[in-house]
Amino acid sequence: MLRLVRFIPVVLRGRIYLDGPLDTVQVFQRDGHLVSRFGYTGSGYGQFGMLSGIWIDSSDRIYIADTRNNRVQSFQWRLPGTPLKVNDARPS
């Protein structure tokens, strides 16, 4: 189910990234087909406190701003399935 989203970056290869319910990231094709869903509420790997932005670089790494956990998490696509966790960046 879709709800009000805070940001909708449209990226390479026709993927649309949305901040989903319960601190998830949902990835759709342009035709609306759900490609992937990842994340949930928490403070561990792949968990988010409050999504506040998504950025994708030229290597298709996905960066997620995680406000309540005071960090940026990055992911890299693996085939097939969901993105693979790459690393964590926390402000010093």
Image: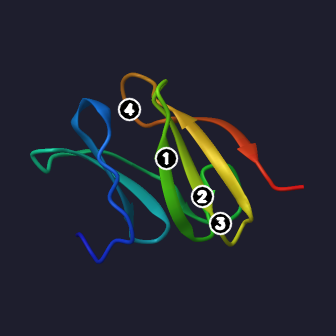
Q: Are marks 2 and 4 in contact (CB under 8 Å)?
A: no
Q: Residues within 10 Å of mark 2 (few under 14, many from 20)?
A: many
Locate the C terminus by quadrant.
bottom right
Q: Residues within 10 Å of mark 4 (few under 14, many from 20)?
A: few
Q: What residue sits 24% from the left and 70% below the top? A: 2
Looking at the image, residue 36 lies above or below residue 13: below
SS at circle 1: strand
In the rendered image, residue 83, in percent from the top left (x then y), is placed at: 47, 36
Q: Which residue is mark 4?
A: 81
**First reached walking from the N terminus: tag 2 or tag 3:** 3
Locate the N terminus by quadrant.
bottom left
SS at circle 3: loop
**First reached walking from the N terminus: tag 4 or tag 1:** 1
Q: Amino acid at mark 3?
A: Gly
Residue 55's mark? 1
* Residues at marks 4 and 1, CA–CA distance in whole angstroms: 20 Å
Q: Amino acid at mark 1?
A: Trp
Q: Is residue 82 left or right of residue 74?
A: left
* Residues at marks 2 and 3, CA–CA distance in whole angstroms: 14 Å
